[in-house]
Image: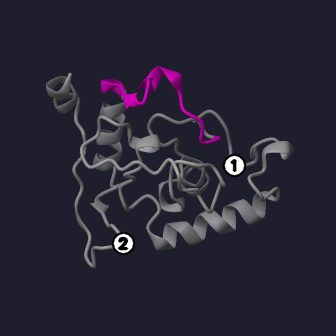
Amino acid sequence: VQSSTNNPPKSTDCHGVCDIAEWLEKSSRLVQRGLGRISPQAMFVVGTNTPGSHDRCNESCEFCQRMGHLDLECPFAFFLAFSKQMPGFNSSGDHLPRHWQGEEITSDCSTLWASMVDEGYFLSTKSKYDAKPKPMDICHPTDLAAHA
């Protein structure tokens, strides 16, 4: 982990919230709604090569105000809530270039996602159309090789 929760984004990049206590409170509410439990599906978060990913380029996160993902998929909120970086992202919610090849995640990044599942994160998917969660379809390195 590169940063602590005492280092929110620069004051000029507060995504609408500049008080760390408010950031932490908002991320805590997201955990109650499923942050860290429900698998992200936004291509911006899991890559275009992950099975079941969705294009959310026109959607804005209510937590960080960035485009491309929803609040329960927010890498920055995830870091604040769990003090862990979401695979492919730094503690500020920015892509880590070494884990991306264009819009696709690398096999190393896919391995990190699988490790997070092994740790108990992202065990289900839930869409606004589904009443019950279903098992997550994680993209493993062998899946990526098959799609290459």
Kindly identify the amino acid type of the residue bearing the numbered disc 1.
Thr
Q: Nearer the viewer, residue 86 or 43?
A: 43
Left or right: where 38 falls relative to 7: left
**Mark 1 vs mark 2, CA separation in Å:** 30 Å
Residue drawn at point x = 67 percent, y = 37 percent: 3
Name the quadrant containing residue 62: bottom right
Precedes in sequence: disc 1 or disc 2:
1
Colour setting: one colour
Pick the quarter of the image with the C terminus: top left
- Of all residues shown, which one is farthest toward the right? 11
**Residue at numbered disc 1:** 5
- Of all residues shown, which one is farthest toward the bottom? 131
Residue drawn at point x = 78 percent, y = 59 percent: 17
Asked if residue 134 is positioned above or below residue 18 in the image, the reply reads below
**Residue at numbered disc 2:** 128
Spot occupied by residue 25 in the image (x, y as percentages of width and height): 68, 68
Neighbor class of circle 1 (other Cα within 10 Å; few <14, some 14-19, many 20+) is some
Residue drawn at point x = 66 percent, y = 55 percent: 65
Spot occupied by residue 36 in the image (x, y as percentages of width and height): 43, 58
